[in-house]
Image (tube, rainbow, N blue to C red):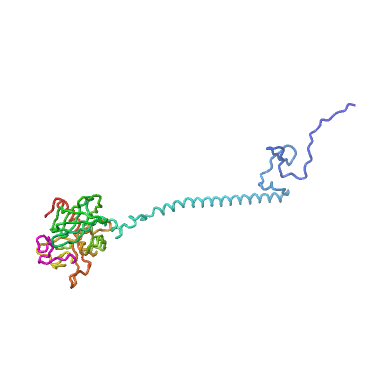
């Protein structure tokens, strides 16, 4: 009897009593999963990653728990995403808002000196004071002090005619303390205006001439001059009235005192320049030679020495040349100070007369 040899069948190890939940790794990089029924290998259903942490009981209960775990993980994932998104949004807002806040704070208007002081007395004083000078006029009868306004960088200066009338020598001091000799270019006694020119001057700061036709009663103004020789004194107030008919002495040349009042009396410069208004005389007799002009009235304090200085609006523009003020005298003959009645020649009168003054005016 011939032996019949059966072909050797491949050996399969017995199945474990439960299906493993861990993959079987055969070699590096190759992972297989055992099938639930004979033949072939099929990948397990998608389970949460935490199943790999240890064995999970089989049966319906474990499945339900697994499903709840999947839902829990999904909720956690969604919450994490929401929190993460919110955090990202918050971070984005913080990082995007920070530069905006910094930019807005750095663009606040009025942080520089000129902007913060615009429209203030301090700002006007700082801007215009370099254009205002003190004028000392010497004559045979003494010396008087007045003020002037620089209108060109090479030293043209506008002042009142009565400040330099009869002077044999004129000395000018600028706001930085420099002293110059000056010559009369032209004068107009009818308007109480004069133009002088500094010798060997350059680089001076010229004032800006405004428009007196736009001035209104109640407008704030600043006056700068050298009252009583106090160079660069600043006062402020408002425009009290327009078009006041003010009468002043036309000239002092030929009078007995050189700066007299028309009656052979010595004019005391501390008492201010005599003028008339409304048929009344103030600060002395104006004499027989006089002229009348339309003036701006202001309550900004003007005192002897302010004559020829500037009346300025809050934009730093010259709107008038200070020319007269009322200052009541005490029994000793000295002044009691300003009482808020000052007058200025409108700057438009000056601008209309400037060419004539430059050509010599009326001497």
- Decide which of 60, 199 is in the foreground and name it: 199
Image spot of residue 37 (x, y percent): 74, 40
Judge by depth and name the residue closer to the eye, 37 or 133: 133
Quarter of the rendering occupied by the C terminus: bottom left
Closer to the camera in the image, 145 or 329: 145
Q: Is residue 314 above or below residue 77?
A: below
At x 40%, y 53%, the residue is: 106
- Compared to residue 212, the image places residue 28 above or below, namely above
Q: Specify whether 87 is left or right of 133.
A: right
Query: Is residue 262 located in the magenta-colored stretch of the structure?
Result: yes
- Give the residues drawn in magenta, as a range: 249-270
Q: Residue 122 location, x and y as percent?
A: 30, 60
Left or right: where does residue 92 sit relative to residue 152? right
Q: Quadrant of residue 257?
A: bottom left
Q: Nearer the viewer, residue 43 or 125?
A: 125
Query: Can you give x and y, in whole percent of width and height, for residue 67 in the image?
Result: 66, 49
**Quarter residue 16 falls in:** top right
Question: Going 42% across and 52% down the picture, which residue do you hit?
Answer: 103
């Amino acid at each position: 009897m011939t032996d019949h040899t059966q072909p050797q069948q491949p050996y399969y190890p017995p199945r474990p009593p439960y299906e493993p939940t861990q993959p079987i790794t055969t070699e590096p990089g190759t992972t297989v999963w055992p099938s639930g029924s004979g033949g072939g290998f099929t990948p397990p259903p998608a389970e949460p990653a935490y199943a790999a942490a240890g064995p999970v009981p089989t049966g319906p209960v474990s499945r339900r728990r697994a499903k709840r775990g999947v839902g829990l993980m999904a909720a956690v994932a969604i919450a994490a995403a929401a929190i993460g998104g919110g955090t990202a949004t918050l971070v984005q807002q913080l990082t995007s808002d920070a530069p905006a806040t910094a930019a807005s704070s750095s663009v606040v208007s009025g942080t520089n000196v000129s902007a913060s002081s615009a429209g203030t007395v301090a700002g006007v004083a700082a801007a215009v004071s370099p254009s205002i000078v003190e004028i000392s006029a010497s004559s045979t009868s003494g010396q008087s002090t007045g003020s002037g306004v620089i209108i060109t960088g090479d030293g043209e200066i506008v002042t009142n005619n009565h400040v330099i009338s009869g002077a044999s020598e004129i000395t000018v001091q600028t706001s930085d303390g420099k002293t110059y000799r000056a010559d009369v270019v032209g004068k107009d006694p009818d308007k109480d205006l004069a133009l002088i020119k500094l010798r060997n001057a350059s680089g001076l700061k010229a004032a800006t001439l405004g428009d007196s036709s736009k001035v209104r009663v109640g407008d704030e103004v600043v006056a700068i001059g050298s009252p009583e020789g106090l160079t660069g004194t600043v006062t402020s107030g408002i425009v009290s009235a327009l078009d006041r008919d003010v009468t002043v002495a036309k000239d002092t040349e030929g009078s007995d005192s050189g700066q007299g009042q028309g009656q052979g009396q010595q004019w005391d410069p501390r008492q201010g320049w005599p003028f008339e208004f409304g048929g009344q005389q103030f600060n002395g007799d104006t004499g027989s030679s006089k002229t009348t002009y339309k003036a701006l009235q202001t309550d900004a304090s003007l005192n002897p020495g302010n004559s020829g200085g500037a009346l300025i609006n809050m934009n730093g523009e010259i709107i008038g040349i200070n020319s007269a003020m009322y200052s009541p005298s005490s029994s000793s003959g000295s002044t009691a100070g300003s009482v808020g009645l000052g007058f200025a020649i409108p700057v438009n009168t000056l601008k209309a007369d400037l060419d004539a003054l430059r050509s010599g005016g009326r001497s």
